[in-house]
């Protein structure tokens, strides 16, 4: 077997045979409630499968770390064996699942957290009590407590979150979890906010039909003040002859302010945005 042939096989691992799904007519029941129960049952099976996937991924992580040779480089900038094992695992898994490496890294980190740090959350996922989205949210909120939190405190925080996960939507669960997190976090909000300010940034994401998303991570007071101003300016422009909705007005005002406006420190005085439109 040639090296090229071996490389092709590694890039395209064999997939297990898919389950044979019966035709929809064979799944029909006499009552609407029976169909809803079937959907709920299948959703629980999806949760169980994602739990097994997390288990397999974390087992692969442990195997990779165990079998990776220890590096002996004296270069202080060189990666250690654990970092090399992690990058190899992410690269191989990303190719196998055809996912971006950033997405795969998050998948590996979530699986590790569920198996190593949050066994009760993993058990709830495996039993079908919560979905993978809830499990991801629990991992995110518990990990946001920081490394200085005792394991017992993390366990207590997890125990407070899990009963809420099965009783409300993910959005409401996130809001409730944030409130509980503020009470459980050992640091003051002022210290955490000052550190979080370093992560402020702007993201541009192209969308369909010549549109794009412009997202900003800002300090909450600045973000709320900016949104309130857009709402106030938009409402001032609304009239009987104004065809645009308030949402459209907010977007138009924000676009004009960012492209033609001037900041308090003088940014934008001599700058003007240039738009290039390419039509295939």
Image (tube, rainbow, N blue to C red):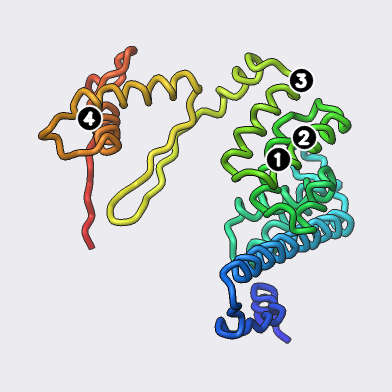
Q: Nearer the viewer, residue 85 or 148?
A: 148
Measuring 71% from the left and 52% from the top, which residue is drawn there? Answer: 130
Q: CA gap, disc 3 to disc 1?
A: 22 Å
Reading the image, the residue beneath label 1 is 164
Q: CA gap, disc 4 to disc 1?
A: 49 Å
Of mark 3 and mark 2, the one earlier in the sequence is 2
Reading the image, the residue beneath label 4 is 272
Q: Left or right? Give the position of 259 relative to 74.
A: left
Which tag is nearer the camera, tag 2 or tag 4? 2
Cβ atoms under marks 1 and 2 closer than 8 Å: yes
Cβ atoms under marks 3 and 1 closer than 8 Å: no
Q: Residue furthest front?
A: 31
Q: Nearer the viewer, residue 96 or 229?
A: 229
Residue 80, horizontal then vertical, whole percent = 80, 45
Q: Is residue 275 above or below residue 44?
A: above
Q: Which mark is residue 160?
A: 2
**Label 1: few (<14), some or many (≥20) within 10 Å?**
some
**Label 4: few (<14), some or many (≥20) within 10 Å?**
few
Determine the secondary structure under disc 3. Answer: loop
Reading the image, the residue beneath label 3 is 186
Determine the secondary structure under disc 4. Answer: loop
Cβ atoms under marks 3 and 2 closer than 8 Å: no
Q: CA gap, disc 3 to disc 4?
A: 46 Å
Q: CA gap, disc 3 to disc 2?
A: 16 Å
Determine the secondary structure under disc 1. Answer: helix
Of mark 3 and mark 1, the one earlier in the sequence is 1
């Amino acid at each position: 077997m040639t090296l090229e042939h071996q490389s092709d096989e590694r890039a395209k691992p064999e997939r297990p045979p898919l389950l044979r799904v019966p035709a929809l007519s064979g799944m029909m029941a006499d009552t609407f409630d029976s169909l809803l129960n079937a959907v709920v049952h299948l959703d629980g099976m999806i949760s169980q499968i994602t739990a097994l996937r997390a288990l397999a991924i974390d087992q692969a992580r442990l195997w990779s770390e165990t079998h990776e040779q220890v590096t002996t480089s004296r270069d202080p900038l060189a990666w250690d064996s654990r970092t090399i094992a992690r990058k190899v695992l992410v690269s191989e898994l990303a190719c196998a699942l055809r996912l971006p490496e950033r997405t795969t890294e998050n998948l590996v980190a979530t699986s590790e957290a569920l198996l190593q740090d949050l066994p009760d959350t993993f058990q709830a996922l495996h039993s079908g009590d919560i979905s993978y989205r809830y499990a991801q949210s629990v991992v995110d909120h518990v990990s946001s407590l920081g490394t200085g939190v005792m394991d017992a405190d993390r366990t207590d925080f997890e125990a407070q979150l899990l009963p809420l996960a099965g009783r409300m939507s993910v959005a409401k669960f996130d809001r409730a979890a944030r409130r509980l997190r503020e009470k459980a976090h050992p640091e003051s909000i002022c210290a955490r906010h000052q550190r979080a300010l370093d992560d402020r940034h702007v993201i541009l994401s192209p969308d369909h039909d010549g549109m794009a998303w412009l997202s900003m991570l800002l300090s909450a007071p600045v973000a709320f003040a900016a949104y309130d101003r857009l709402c106030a300016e938009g409402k001032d422009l609304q009239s009987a002859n104004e065809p645009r909705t308030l949402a459209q007005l907010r977007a138009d005002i924000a676009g004009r302010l960012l492209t033609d406006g001037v900041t308090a420190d003088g940014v934008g005085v001599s700058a003007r945005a240039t738009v290039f439109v390419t039509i295939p």
